[in-house]
Image (spheres, rainbow, N blue to C red):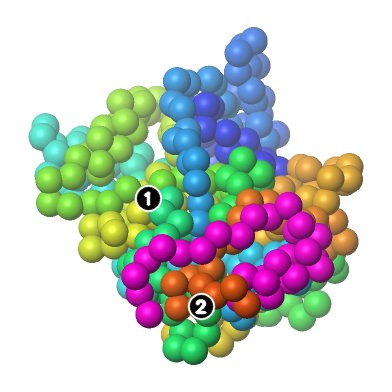
Amino acid sequence: MNPFLSTTSNLRYFLRLPCCGTYDRLLEEIPPPTSNEHLIRLPGPLSVRAVPCDDQPMTVDEAWHYTTAAGLLNIVRHNRLWASSAAFMNDASEIKTGKRALQDAAAARQPPLEDWQLNALRVLGVLTDGKPDKVFLLSASVEGDALTLWRSYGQGTEAEYAIRIDPLVGLTPVVQNVLEQHPSPPPGWGDEVEDWTERGEPIPGPDPDQPYTWGGDWDAVQYLNEDSTLAPDELERIVRELRPPRSGRLSIPLIGDYFTEIDPSVLFKNTGFKDEREVRVTWTVNPWWKFVLYRASRFGVTPYIEVAAHDGTEPSDLERERSLLMPHRVGRLPLMSVRIGPTRATESAEHALRQLLDAHGYGETSIVTSSAPYR
C-alpha cells in the first residue's frame, strides 16, 4: 500500500488540481467526502477523492519463477527476490508497448476524441510514452514446467530451477539505505518548486527523501496481437469517466493509478512472448537511493530492487504507511515448491536441494522434478 493513495483496485480515484493556488486553498475547495468516499492528501497542491467502483482484480493462482542455480542459492540464503528494471528485459519494448497501443487506439478512435479529452488523457498519463526505467518487474509464469522457459533460463552447465511462489503472500521492496537524507545529494536535489503563491513566493515540492513505493500485486500479462481489443477497451474505460472541465479547474479520474507508472498498460506485451504465459508483480520506488541496487548483466549495469515477505512481527508506522520493509524485518519467502529442471533432474540433485532448503528454514517447501524431454 502507498502512503498517499491506496492501490486497491476496487477504488476509483479523482484528482482535483487547480490552475494555481496553495495546498490549503485547494483543500478548502474540495467538498467533504460522503460516507462512501475517502479524501486523501497527497504531497504538493493536490488531493484525491476515492470512491468505490466495480472493477475487480484478476486472480493469479500460480506463479513459477525460473532461475539458475546461482539465483536459487541467493534467494534461499537471503530470503529475497530480485525485481529488475523494466528497461533491461529481454523484451526491448517492455512497458512501452502498452502506452503505444493506447496512443494508437486514441488516434484511431471514432468519433475522434475532443481536445479537452485529449488534454485530460495527457495530464493523466494515458497518452504519454512508457517509462520502463521507473518500473521494476518480478516475472513468473503460470506454467511450472515449460520447455520454452527451461531453454531460456538454461546457463550451460548450470542447473535450472523453477520456484513456485504463493501469490497470496505480499512481497514488499526492502530498504537498502536507512539514512533519512540523501548521503550525497546531486545538484538541485530538493529544489523542486510545486507552485507559486499569488505574491510570487515558491511553494516547495514534496520532500525527495520521503520513502514510499507503489505496486505489489500479481497480475497476468495480456498479449497484444493485430486483432486485440485490449488497448481500445482500456481507453474507453477511461474516456467514460472523463468530464468536461469547469472554469478554472481540472478534474481527472485517476483510474488504474496512471500517475504512479503502475497502471494496466504495464501488463500489455508483444504477442511474440505469449508462450511464456507470464504473470508479474510491478513496483515503483522513491527515492531510488534508498531502494535500488545494481548488478552486471548482458545489458550492462542493471538496476534492481530486492523484495521480500514480512517476518510476521508488528510493522512500524513507517513500514505500514509507506509500503516498505526494513532489512531487520525480512522473513522467509512464500516458497511453495521448487522444481528441478530437466538437465539436472537426478537423485543427487534432489538430495542436495532438500538439504539446502532444510538448512534455511524451508523444510515445508516441496521438491518436484521436470518431465520435459530436454537436455
Q: Nearer the viewer, residue 30 or 283?
A: 283
Other residues around mark 1 within 10 Å, as few (<14) / some (14–19) / many (≥20): many
Which amino acid type is shown beneath numbered disc 2? Arg
Q: CA distance from mark 1 to mark 2?
A: 29 Å
Residue position marked by numbered label 1 in the rendering: 221
82 sits left or right of 113 in the view: right
Q: Is residue 368 shown to the viewer in this render?
A: yes
In-front residue for pair 219/192: 219
Residue 340 percent location from the top left of the image: 53, 68
Given residues 353 and 167, the one toward you in this image is: 353
The residue positioned 62% from the left and 77% from the top of the image is 348
Confirm whether residue 44 shows in the render: no
Give the residue number, with chain letter if any, for mark 2. 344
Q: Left of 317 or right of it: where is 282? A: left
The x and y percentages for residue 216 are: 59, 48
Total labels drawn: 2
Earlier-in-chain disc, 1 versus 2: 1
| Horizontal relation, residue 373 to residue 19: left or right | left
Stretch of the chain drawn in magenta: 349-375
Q: Nearer the viewer, mark 1 or mark 2?
A: 2
Residue at 74% x, 48% y is 322
**Kind of residue sitting beneath label 1:** Val
Horizontal and vertical percent position of residue 297: 51, 85
x 68%, y 79%: residue: 186
Q: Whole-percent x and y of residue 241?
A: 36, 26
Residues marked 1 and 2 touching at CB (< 8 Å): no
Residue 350 located within the stretch drawn in magenta: yes
